[in-house]
Image (spheres, grey):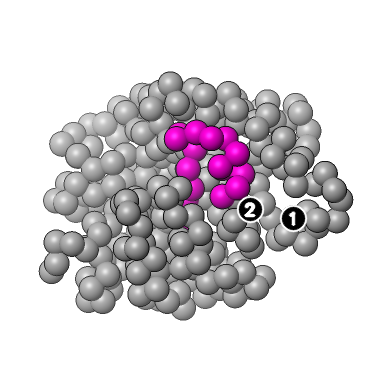
């Protein structure tokens, strides 16, 4: 197998680390921990969970990140009090990053399909998304800069990947970059008329620091194993290979047992290792 192929990592909850520890360590694979995004966790005592993760990851030399909070809100809420709650949640996510020694946190894009069809209806609509997002995240980004954590904004319903890129660019920070979720992009392509997945990779360009790898049918957010859906994976990996840097490529699968067959699929296709 070519050593030039990208090394694939995974998104895992802490309780799955023991199962995949040897696989993670064998090639210093990137890891995104997905145990710290719920409000109930962030409001509780999450430190024992961090200690367990650190114990299980002893010896791991891959890059480490977390999925930040996202349920129940948008980073561009019109309500100023909600923006303060969202800011608090993001700061709590950065607390976890500091305790873990993680240097990346995934956050969600505010753009929806409804936005795509309505942002040009009122003259101030686009500017308001920027205004509200900055009010939510300016202090979070400043802290991320001080802490050495990169926030990566993931596409959710985004129909035009350039909208999210322009929003991220408006912060002018090396600590706010882009993430592409392949299944979300495929949903937007098949169900809402967005460009195909590789276009999202190409548009992100130098700002792309993170990719969620999941397969889907373009109808729902399946998080299937790779090769089980209809994403054209060679085009996705060609777009990644054209980049001058190496974003984190992590399998985000609903069924973690699909990690080995997904890796077998990538290896057989000569796409990743």
Q: CA distance from mark 1 to mark 2?
A: 10 Å
Check if mark 1's residue and mark 2's residue have beta carbons within 8 Å: yes
Q: What residue is pinned by disc 2? A: 163
Name the N-terminal-most of marks 1 and 2: 1
Left or right: 202 with respect to 263? Answer: right
Which residue appears farthest toward the right when viewing the image? 122
The answer to whether residue 13 of the structure is visible from this angle is no
Q: What residue is pinned by disc 1? A: 115
Q: Nearer the viewer, residue 155 or 205?
A: 205
Residue 95's spot in the image, x, y percent? 45, 24
Extent of the magenta region: 165-181
Is residue 176 inside the magenta stretch? Answer: yes
Residue 30's spot in the image, x, y percent? 28, 47
Residue 61's spot in the image, x, y percent? 19, 39
Q: Is residue 69 above or below residue 87?
A: below
Is residue 248 inside the magenta stretch? Answer: no
Q: Quadrant of the C terminus?
A: bottom left
Residue 201's spot in the image, x, y percent? 45, 61
Q: Nearer the viewer, residue 127 or 253?
A: 127
Q: Is residue 158 above or below residue 12?
A: below
């Amino acid at each position: 197998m070519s050593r030039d192929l990208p090394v694939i990592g995974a998104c895992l909850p802490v309780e799955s680390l023991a199962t995949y520890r040897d696989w993670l360590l064998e090639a210093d694979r990137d890891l995104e921990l997905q145990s710290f995004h719920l409000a109930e966790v962030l409001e509780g005592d999450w430190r024992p969970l961090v200690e367990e993760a650190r114990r299980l990851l002893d010896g791991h030399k891959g890059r480490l990140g977390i999925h930040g909070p996202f349920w129940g809100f948008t980073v561009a809420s019109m309500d100023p009090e909600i923006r303060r709650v969202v800011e608090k949640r993001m700061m709590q996510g950065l607390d976890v990053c500091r305790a873990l020694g993680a240097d990346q946190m995934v956050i969600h894009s505010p753009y929806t399909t409804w936005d795509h069809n309505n942002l040009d209806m009122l003259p101030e609509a686009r500017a308001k998304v920027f205004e509200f997002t900055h009010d939510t995240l300016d202090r979070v980004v400043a802290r991320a800069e001080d802490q050495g954590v990169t926030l990566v904004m993931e596409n959710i319903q985004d129909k035009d990947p350039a909208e999210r890129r322009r929003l991220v660019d408006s912060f002018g920070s090396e600590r706010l970059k882009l993430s592409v979720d392949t299944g979300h992009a495929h949903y937007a392509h098949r169900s809402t008329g967005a460009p195909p997945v590789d276009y999202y990779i190409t548009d992100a360009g130098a700002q792309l620091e993170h990719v969620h790898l999941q397969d889907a049918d373009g109808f729902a957010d399946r998080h299937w194993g790779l090769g089980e859906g209809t994403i054209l994976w060679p085009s996705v990996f060609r777009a990644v290979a054209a980049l001058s840097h190496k974003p984190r490529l992590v399998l985000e699968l609903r069924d973690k047992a699909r990690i080995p067959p997904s890796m077998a699929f990538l290896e057989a296709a000569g796409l990743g290792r």
